[in-house]
Image (cartoon, rainbow, N blue to C red):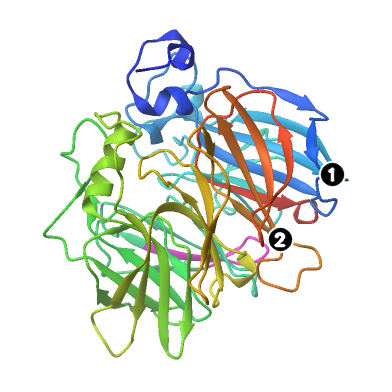
Amino acid sequence: MVNHSLAWEGVLTSLPYISDHYAPVAEERTARELRVRGTLPKELEGRYLRNGHNPKPGVTPTHWFKGSGMIHGLRLREGRAEWYRNRWVRTPLLEGVAEGHGDLTASVAGTHVIEHAGRLLALQEANLPFEIDAELNTVGAYDFGGRLKTNMTAHPKEDPVTGELHFFAYSPFPPHLIYYVASPRGEITRQEVVEDAGPSLMHDFAITENFVVWIDMSVIFDAAETGGLPYRWHDDYAPRIGVMPRMGPAEVTWHAVEPGVLLHVTNAYEDNGRIVLDGPRFDRGAWETSSKFWAGRPAHPETPAVGIRQHRWILDPAATIAKEEAVDDLVVDFPAINNQVLGRPNRYGYAVAFPGGGLHRHGIVKYDNHSGARSLTSGDEHHIPGEAVFVPAENGTAEDDGYLLTIVSDTRRHASEFIVYDASTLDTVATVELPHRVPGGIHGSWIPDADL
């Protein structure tokens, strides 16, 4: 049953992506000096920003990902929660002045928000990034000084050693895949067409020290798909994962894999000449259930989604078929690591857990890749966490010395809190009470003051 108090602008709706936990908020707010329980670490000096889809009042998007982007932000300083604010990303699409098909500024900009070269960028993979300022005001579309003339993925990777930003554009039409590299100063230094890529849903990818890893799996573009996302599972499409050198020509070695979908990569790294790739793998049932939910087709949040499990692929350059295995039987998504080891061997990984097997998130899980152990935050089905963002401790020595930041919503009180967890123990360090409910969203980042 729809909770009418959380239906969008009083409109009775059974669309799951604009009701209950996902019901949009109707106004932008600013609150200062928020109440804190526990102690905020003083080394957390910066901004936590989280993006998500939040259509304007009276607008009913045809699926979740068409809702206009709204960024929720907290400013932490000297052990205080100095402010919270939420702002729509003011794109031409939000304002109703987009030029139509082919307009790269016609974006909802609602998937992710990152920092690179001192700029804050709101991302949505079908369009150009949108720059915002430190107070969450929209600056405008950003094209890397005129060098970016395509769309840009919402999952770029910043190499922790070189500071380069690696990203790509994918398209249902040739060329299907273009690879980009931007310098630490934000200048595009490489642009390569990957000739033999296919029209698949390539939402994420991976980098290692020397290679780029492409995900070309079982869900492909289908313009004939009606009533929701323009993608469908294709049994006859040969799923594969590709490995391409970061330097030199864009030549890809492809490895056949079992049917599935990898929407979010945990990490990839080199191991004795092979590449190890980890991430939550969707099977067909999980894809069908999730895509129906996103598109508003009959799919209740508690419908089992048991086929999203942490998975590992081992890509051997001497083989054309990847070795692969399920790492765990827990339903997970939205993985995270300490980005200081991105592209390098990582011992620890984190993800949002769905212990009940449904589409509602109930906790944060930590994996130890050395021991095989896993641990979970304490919680219940009424407290729904978002994606966790790892922040390294200032003087940390171990990989898991740091903090996990996330927004947790209480579905009984229709309220939300910002929570800081100890990334080593998963104990709660501090909780910040937010001035209103924050709808379920997607991806976010921690932006230290020193980076702006």
Q: Quadrant of residue 202?
A: bottom left
- Residue in the picture at 64% in, 69% down: 340
State the residue in front, 450 or 259: 259
* Residue that sits furthest to the right in the current view: 78
| Span colored in magenta | 178-189
Report the residue marked by disc 1. Answer: 77
- Amino acid carrying mark 2 in the image: Gly
On the question of residue 214 being in view, the answer is yes
Residue 438 left/right relative to 352: right
Q: Position of residue 141 (x, y in %)?
A: 56, 41
Q: Position of residue 66 (x, y in %)?
A: 39, 32
| Marks 2/1: CA–CA distance | 17 Å
State the residue in front, 172 or 63: 63
Q: Which image quarter is the N terminus in?
A: top left
- Amino acid carrying mark 1 in the image: Arg
Number of other residues with Cα within 10 Å of mark 1, as a class: few under 14, some 14 to 19, many 20 or more: some
- 397 relative to 360, above or below: below
- Residue in the picture at 44% in, 44% down: 127
Report the residue marked by disc 2. Answer: 402
Q: Position of residue 300 (x, y in %)?
A: 31, 31
- Residue in the picture at 46% in, 49% down: 353
Q: Is residue 186 magenta?
A: yes
Residue 256 left/right relative to 419: left
Regarding mark 2 in the picture, which secondary structure is present there?
Answer: strand
